[in-house]
Image (tube, rainbow, N blue to C red):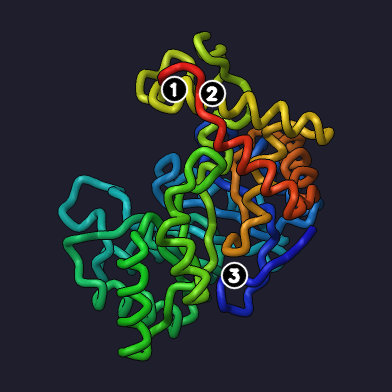
């Protein structure tokens, strides 16, 4: 397993991480323990979850799975999404941040969180208030590092400027959707991260499952997939992306791999990326992701992949 620094921090994270969005949703407590155990055995040390995942069950299951082996793991969680019906049960206010962290610590059954991330930007709370509250939690020992998620490049840069100006703990990472089919962050966020020393943690590395190759143009989504009978998923099943996925799969198979292996390998080849997190349901999927992370793409490979992506679809989306 390869380990990289998380942004400009000294924290070293496995290039293949484990996402906890399946825990409590598709994976029960016993299965979570099996998945987490397989990940640790394979050298994975980065586990990402959020308080909102399955209304706290994901954190609870992860905490139980790490009982007795806590020091082998880096726990990353997120806060900011709505967790109740009250006026202060969402957002990035000091009140909500502190209450959320204490609740997460209880669910995770741990004394500290390695990486605490703001799940999304809160336009109703001054960044100074958010960053000051996070800094207090770091100084108190409840949190080791902080990051953000779904922040625009300029918002992230503004937050870093405020932290520098006020001598506050600064973000070391940002989560954003990034994959072979979604490269918009390469325009602004990626250059900012490279310049400012912020590690990128892509979510949806498999484009919510599209890059597994399970879906085909003009055909209904197979049963037992996320896209089956799911109108909200339909935009991801556009013809252009499905045809691109087929071309990528053909190229990958020419190299002895699949598009599902290409997707994380390509992300790992991007210099701003620190770790690739994907939710899984079985230990076998953990092993598959780890194998994919061992595929090192050369500059020629990356050039060829760009060529595959540049081929226009023969039919309209």
Q: Determine which quarter of the picture holds residue 35.
A: top right
Q: Nearer the viewer, residue 73 or 211?
A: 211
- Camera-near label (3 vs 1) is 1
Q: In the image, is residue 82 above or below residue 172?
A: above
Quadrant, the C terminus: top left
Q: Determine which quarter of the picture holds residue 80.
A: bottom left
Contact check, label 2 and label 3, Cβ < 8 Å: no
Q: CA distance from mark 3 to mark 1?
A: 34 Å
Q: Residue furthest top?
A: 219
For the residue labelled by badge 3, is the local secondary structure a helix, a strand or a loop?
loop
- The crowding category of the residue bearing disc 2, from other C-alpha atoms within 10 Å (few below 14, some 14 to 19, many at least 20), is many
Residue at (69, 58) in percent of width and height = 15
Quadrant, the N terminus: bottom right
Q: For this view, does 226 lie left or right of residue 2?
A: left
Q: For this view, does 274 lie left or right of residue 95?
A: right
Q: In the image, is residue 67 above or below residue 53?
A: below
* Residue 76 point in image, percent of width and height: 53, 60
For the residue labelled by badge 1, is the local secondary structure a helix, a strand or a loop?
loop
Residue at (75, 43) in percent of width and height = 292
- The crowding category of the residue bearing disc 1, from other C-alpha atoms within 10 Å (few below 14, some 14 to 19, many at least 20), is some
The residue carrying mark 2 is 242
Q: In the image, is residue 8 above or below residue 214?
A: below
Q: CA distance from mark 2 to mark 3?
A: 33 Å
Q: Nearer the viewer, residue 88 or 81?
A: 81
Disc number placed over residue 26 in the picture, else none: none
* Residue 219 point in image, percent of width and height: 52, 9
Q: In the image, is residue 212 above or below residue 180?
A: above
The residue carrying mark 1 is 238
């Amino acid at each position: 397993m390869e380990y990289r620094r998380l942004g400009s921090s000294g924290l070293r994270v496995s290039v293949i991480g484990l996402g906890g969005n399946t825990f409590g949703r598709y994976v029960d407590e016993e299965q979570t323990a099996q998945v987490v155990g397989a990940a640790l055995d394979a050298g994975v040390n980065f586990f990402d979850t959020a308080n909102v995942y399955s209304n706290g069950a994901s954190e609870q299951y992860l905490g139980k799975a790490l009982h007795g082996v806590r020091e082998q793991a880096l726990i990353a969680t997120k806060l900011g999404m709505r967790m109740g019906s009250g006026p202060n049960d969402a957002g990035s206010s000091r009140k909500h941040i502190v209450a959320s962290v204490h609740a997460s610590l209880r669910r995770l059954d741990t004394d500290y969180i390695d990486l605490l991330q703001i799940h999304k930007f809160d336009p109703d709370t001054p960044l100074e208030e958010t960053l000051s509250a996070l800094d207090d939690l770091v100084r108190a020992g409840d949190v080791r590092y902080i990051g953000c998620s779904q922040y625009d490049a300029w918002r992230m840069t503004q937050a870093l400027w405020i932290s520098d100006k006020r001598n506050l703990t600064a973000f070391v990472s940002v989560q954003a959707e990034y994959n072979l089919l979604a490269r918009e962050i390469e325009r602004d966020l990626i250059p900012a991260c490279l310049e400012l020393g912020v590690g990128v943690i892509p979510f949806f590395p498999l484009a919510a499952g599209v890059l597994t190759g399970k879906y085909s143009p003009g055909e209904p989504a197979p049963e037992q997939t996320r896209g089956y009978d799911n109108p909200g998923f339909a935009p991801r099943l556009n013809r252009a992306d499905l045809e691109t996925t087929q071309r990528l799969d053909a190229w990958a198979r020419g190299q002895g791999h699949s598009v599902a292996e290409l997707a994380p390998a390509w992300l790992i080849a991007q210099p701003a990326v620190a770790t690739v997190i994907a939710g899984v349901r079985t230990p076998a999927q953990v092993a598959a992701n780890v194998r994919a992370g061992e595929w090192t793409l050369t500059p020629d490979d990356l050039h060829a992949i760009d060529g595959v992506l540049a081929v226009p679809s023969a039919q309209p989306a």
